Structure formats: structure tokens, C-alpha cells
Image: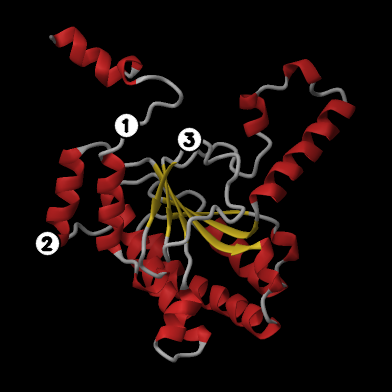
Amino acid sequence: MPFQQATGADKKHQDRLRLEGRIPEHIAIIMDGNGRWAKKRSFPRAAGHKEGVNSVRDIVEACGQLGLRYLTLYTFSTENWKRPQNEVSMLMRLIVHALRNERDRMHKNDVRLMTIGDLSALPEDVARELVDAVESMRHNKGLALILALNYSGRWDILEAVKKIDREISAGHLKKNDLTEEVFKDFLSTKGIPDPDLVIRTSGEYRISNFLLWQVAYSEMYIADELWPSFRRKQLYEAIADYQRRERRFGMVSEQLPSAAKFHKAF
């Protein structure tokens, strides 16, 4: 069963985006600012993380309605283990709670849940809940929601290098056959297109070790809103900004297919 059609002003926003230009195939989001959102309101940090789950729910639904194929959320980085133990434990409980609460809803809306990162280091109950949820939605055909858990871009690249070294040592791969396309197949994002648009909330201008290989030509959008305040309205603004950009991938404007069609017509 697909996501229900948006109504009212929300539908107008979505229709306008479809008319204005191409909807990104893949959006990746660095969800930053939960703690600051809570601090500004004199709430405990846990309140910011809990409200952030509501933002996740709204963004997933909006992306499904828009027809996106992939949404990657930077859920927990390898560096996040450095946070106070009580906060890390709370985050792990929140992940389990959110998976249990949202699982049926996502499944009914044809969401396909995927993960990237080193799941072996996660607590057993988190890993078990995650694996079960991924398996239950494995055959869904709608939006692919990718949770980056215990993930870092450097880890991803280093793991790819280790796998390639094993393949070469075993004689399954020759050094001279190693290309960028071959290398991509050893990353955790194998089979997933690189993000068209990367959104970071909270006004910070950092990649924070996220998808370092994959975002080489992604468009970046910095939102001033803290993640718990980032909802579909802000998502639509980010996509509209993306649609106004010219993606050249190292070429000049005249080399782009759209420009070639324009010059041919005139």
C-alpha cells in the first residue's frame, strides 16, 4: 500500500516541485542539533532526540509521497560512542523503541529498510531488532530508507580496501582491473546510487565523516533549523534550492544534455 496522497497546501508544495524540475533520486541527511534544540528549551538532551524521531517520521512520509527512491539518514556515527555513556544508552533504547513503533507503519507504506555501518558493534537487542525489521521489509518496492548506524565514511573506505586486498590475494581480482566503478562495489552502499542532495541541519558546514566517497559530486544544502524543527516544509525548500542548481560534474554548461537540446532547438 503506497503512502497516502498529501492534501491541501502540502499537495500544492509537492506538485510545484514536480513541475519545477527533477526530484532527487537519493537524498542523504546529516541530522544535527537534537541536543541544542533541547538545551534552548531547558529540556534534557533526551527530549531533543525523541522529538527528532518525529522529524524522521515526517521526512520519510514526505519523501515517500514525492516518489524518492532512496533516503539515507545519518543515525549514529562511530564517533558518537565518545558521548557520555548514559546518552549513548538512551540513544540505543530510542532506536529500538522507534523501530518497534514505526515498523508496521513503514511496512504498510511499502518502505524498504536498509542499513549501512558496522552492526557488529551495536548492542545485541538493537542489532536483533534492526535485522528483523530489515528482513520483514526486504521485498517492499517503495522508498528505500537507509539508516547509517555505527557508520563513518573513513571506516567504509578502509573496509573496502581490506576486501579488495583479500580479493587480490585470493586471485579473484587483478590490480589492473581496479577502477572507480569496481571500487564502488566494495563499499557498504553497493547498488545504491550516490546522493544527489545532502542536507545538513543546524547551520553547521561539515560532512562529519559521512559518505566521504559517495558525496563527491552531491549538492550540499545547509539548513539553519535544528533537526527536531526540520520538517517537510524545510525539506521542500531544500529540494527547490537543489532544482535551481546546474549539476555539471566537471563539465561546462554547454556540454550538458539540457543545454545541447536548447542550442539544437534554436
Residue depth check, mark 2 versus mark 1: number of the one nearer the observer:
1
Label 1 sits on what residue type? Glu
Evaluate whether residue 1 shows in this view: no
Indicate the colouring scheme: secondary structure
Horizontal and vertical percent position of residue 239 = 29, 48
Give the quadrant of residue 190.
Answer: top right
Out of 107 and 150, give the one closest to the viewer: 150
Which residue does the image show at 81% across and 39% down from the upper left? 162
Residue occupying the far right of the picture: 169
Name the residue rendered at 17%, 60% in the picture.
10
Task: Look at label 3 and name its amino acid.
Answer: Tyr
Q: Earlier in the sequence, mark 2 or mark 1?
A: 2
- Give the CA separation, mark 3 to mark 2: 33 Å
Q: Is residue 59 visible?
A: yes
Q: Residue at x 34, y 72 (%)?
A: 229
Instruction: Identify the element where label 2 is drawn.
Output: helix
- Determine the secondary structure under disc 1: loop
Q: Which residue is mark 3?
A: 217
Q: Name the residue that disc number 2 marks.
A: 9
